[in-house]
């Protein structure tokens, strides 16, 4: 039996590039830990998005760029060791200036990222759907993109996000996006567009693979995957949906226990032990442990036989 942890993909970025070419659109749900990523893979999603907002939220922190590069790389490794689908990693502003972005790309590549996303906000950054965002000058973002492209050692996809729509307007977002394409970005992510018409206009004027963010409770209205496909988008993310669902479900379960002193009336809302064990391959771990124990026992018995003879 092989070692249970999966070997990382040799070039996950190449796999993602092939998906972008082959698929009409890639639906990448947001994940924030390895179990949720594995669940997404088992349910048939072909890629997933390690959301900075969901990850920091799971650590009870706001999405203000508080997480460190080493923490992000660690969680990326936790995820990429158990799934074979490409993982798009939200690296916020790249953890510093252009020279820092080079290290960011190398660290996240080593952790198994298929794509690395950086954005053009200043620190402390904000959620893309909140007011009060500030942007770095276009030339500073171009420097970061050039650094990211030249730092990669594989076919890692570099995604450039622009938050200009909510600060300077749609025209400025389109202008920045085209500049980022010229700088070498593989995919453009226009954040917080405010209508399907804006998404269509953006797609008409920016000639690159495009990523759309279908988050909840933000400035973007609810648009379906089919509508994004028809508008010309290649990737759509649902970055915080699983985290919000998990928090809501946990709150309901805790309220039930507080009120009734038992969970037995809501077992239908819980993943069963068997379902979870099947997901993570629990019995394969047990079988592996038995196999190692049997081999060790035979080795010790053989050694004792030699001593006794």
Image: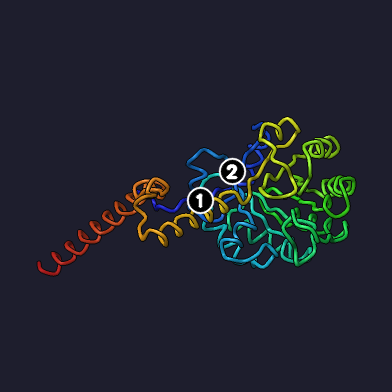
Q: Quadrant of residue 151?
A: bottom right
Residue pushed farthest left?
Answer: 309
Q: Which residue is mark 1?
A: 36
Q: Give residue 85's mark.
A: none
Q: What x and y, as percent, mark residue 247?
A: 53, 56
Q: Indicate the quadrant containing the C terminus: top left, top right, bottom left or bottom right.
A: bottom left
Provide the secondary structure element on which disc 2 rests.
loop
* Image mark count: 2
Image height check: is 46 above or below 284? above
Q: What x and y, as percent, mark residue 11?
A: 60, 47
Please report the residue visible at 78 percent of the width from the left and 40 percent of the height from the top. Answer: 195
Q: Which residue is mark 2?
A: 47
Are the residues flagged by discs 1 and 2 in contact, CB closer than 8 Å?
no
Q: Is residue 231 visible?
A: yes
Please report the residue visible at 84 percent of the width from the left and 34 percent of the height from the top. Answer: 204
Coloring basis for residues? rainbow
In three-dimensional space, the C-alpha distance between marks 1 and 2, rounded to whole angstroms, equals: 12 Å
Horizontal placement of 281 versus 113: left or right?
A: left
Horizontal placement of 142 versus 293: left or right?
A: right
Closer to the camera in the image, 170 or 143? 170
Residue pushed farthest front?
Answer: 259
Q: Earlier in the sequence, mark 1 or mark 2?
A: 1
Provide the secondary structure element on which disc 1 rests.
helix
């Amino acid at each position: 039996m092989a070692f249970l942890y999966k070997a990382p993909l040799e070039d996950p970025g190449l796999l993602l590039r092939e998906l972008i070419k082959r698929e009409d659109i890639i639906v990448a749900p947001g994940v924030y830990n390895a179990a949720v990523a594995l669940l997404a893979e088992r349910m048939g999603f072909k890629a997933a998005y390690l959301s900075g907002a969901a990850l920091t939220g799971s650590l009870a922190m706001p999405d203000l760029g508080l997480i460190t590069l080493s923490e992000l790389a660690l969680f990326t490794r936790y995820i990429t060791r158990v799934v074979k689908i490409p993982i798009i990693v939200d690296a916020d502003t790249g953890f510093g200036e252009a020279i820092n972005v080079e290290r960011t790309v190398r660290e996240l590549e080593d952790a198994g990222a298929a794509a690395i996303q950086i954005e053009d906000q200043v620190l402390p950054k904000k959620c893309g759907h909140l007011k009060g965002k500030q942007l770095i000058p276009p030339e500073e973002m171009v420097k970061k993109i050039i650094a990211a492209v030249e730092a990669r050692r594989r076919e890692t996809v570099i995604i450039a996000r622009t938050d200009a729509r909510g600060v300077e307007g749609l025209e400025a977002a389109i202008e920045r996006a085209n500049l980022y394409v010229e700088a070498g970005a593989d995919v453009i992510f226009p954040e917080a567009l405010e209508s399907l018409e804006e998404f269509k206009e953006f797609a008409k004027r920016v000639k690159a693979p495009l990523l759309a963010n279908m988050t909840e409770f933000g400035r973007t209205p609810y648009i379906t995957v089919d509508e994004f496909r028809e508008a010309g988008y290649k990737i759509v993310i649902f970055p915080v949906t699983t985290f919000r669902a998990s928090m809501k479900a946990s709150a309901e379960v805790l309220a039930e226990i507080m009120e009734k002193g038992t969970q037995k009336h809501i077992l239908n809302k819980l993943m069963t032990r068997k379902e979870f064990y099947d997901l993570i391959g629990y019995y394969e771990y047990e079988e592996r442990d038995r196999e190692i124990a049997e081999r060790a026992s035979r080795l010790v018995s053989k050694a004792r036989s030699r001593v006794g003879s």
